[in-house]
């Protein structure tokens, strides 16, 4: 996983002046996610164009021009509650932005819900299914999503990489 993350960060540096990485801590990998963030921070400690967020916070925020982006694993707050969390926790940013998105991953499948003021998305995972999930009948696709945002006009593009592209 760290090799994949480094490859993503390095490719992003080829195109962008600065890269910010948030490793959202999940309910199955709370300590491992924290360790990954610390490892990446150590690896890129001499690269001023990379910021690795090592915060243990359950909610992360990123402001990009007229965009406010929030992340949460999705195992604590329910998706429909995230609108209120964003509006309450980021009042100033909420008032100053036109485009707001919240990303979660807990459910491991693509689900998009637009509610007043924010688009809430649950994204797939790259992780392989375990015995419990298979026994419950879950058959989510494995993919990684990259969204592109325009500073003023919001969500502009989406690129999807399936697990077979990473394994090949």
Image: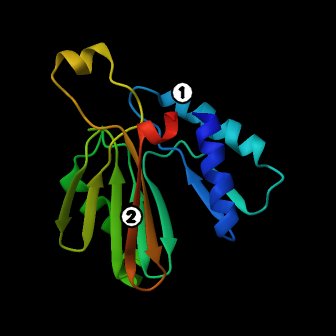
Which residue lies most toward the right here? 46
Give residue 112's quadrant in the image.
bottom left
Q: Is residue 52 above or below residue 168?
A: below
Residue occupying image coordinates x 60% and y 50%: 8
Residue occupying image coordinates x 18% and y 73%: 116
Q: Position of residue 23 (x, y in %)?
A: 53, 44
| Res 57 visible | yes
Disc 1 from disc 2: Cα separation:
30 Å
Q: Residues within 10 Å of mark 1 (few under 14, many from 20)?
A: few
Q: Nearer the viewer, residue 127 or 34?
A: 127
Number of marks in the rendered image: 2
Q: Which residue is denoted by mark 1 in the rendering?
A: 31
Q: Nearer the viewer, residue 119 or 10?
A: 10
Secondary element type, mark 2? strand
Residue occupying image coordinates x 42% and y 65%: 69
Residue occupying image coordinates x 64% and y 56%: 11
Q: Position of residue 59 (x, y in %)?
A: 43, 51
Give residue 49's quadrant in the image.
bottom right
Secondary element type, mark 1? helix
Q: Position of residue 93 (x, y in %)?
A: 43, 76
Position of 49 compared to 129: left or right? right
Q: Which residue is denoted by mark 2 in the rendering?
A: 158
| Quadrant position of the N terminus in the picture | top right
Q: Is residue 157 above or below residue 58?
A: below
């Amino acid at each position: 996983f760290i090799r994949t993350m480094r490859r993503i960060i390095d490719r992003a540096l080829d195109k962008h002046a600065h890269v910010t990485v948030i490793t959202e801590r999940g309910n199955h990998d709370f300590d491992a996610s924290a360790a990954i963030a610390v490892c990446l921070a150590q690896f890129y400690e001499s690269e001023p164009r990379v910021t690795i967020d090592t915060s243990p916070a359950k909610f992360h925020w990123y402001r990009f021009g007229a965009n406010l982006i929030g992340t949460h694993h999705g195992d604590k707050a329910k998706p429909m509650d995230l609108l209120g969390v964003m509006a309450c926790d980021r009042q100033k940013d909420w008032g100053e932005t036109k485009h707001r998105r919240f990303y979660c991953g807990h459910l491991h499948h693509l689900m998009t819900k637009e509610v007043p003021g924010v688009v809430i998305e649950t994204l797939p995972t790259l992780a392989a299914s375990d015995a419990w999930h298979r026994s419950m009948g879950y058959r989510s696709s494995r993919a990684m999503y990259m969204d592109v945002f325009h500073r003023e006009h919001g969500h502009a593009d989406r690129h999807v990489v399936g697990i077979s592209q990473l394994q090949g």
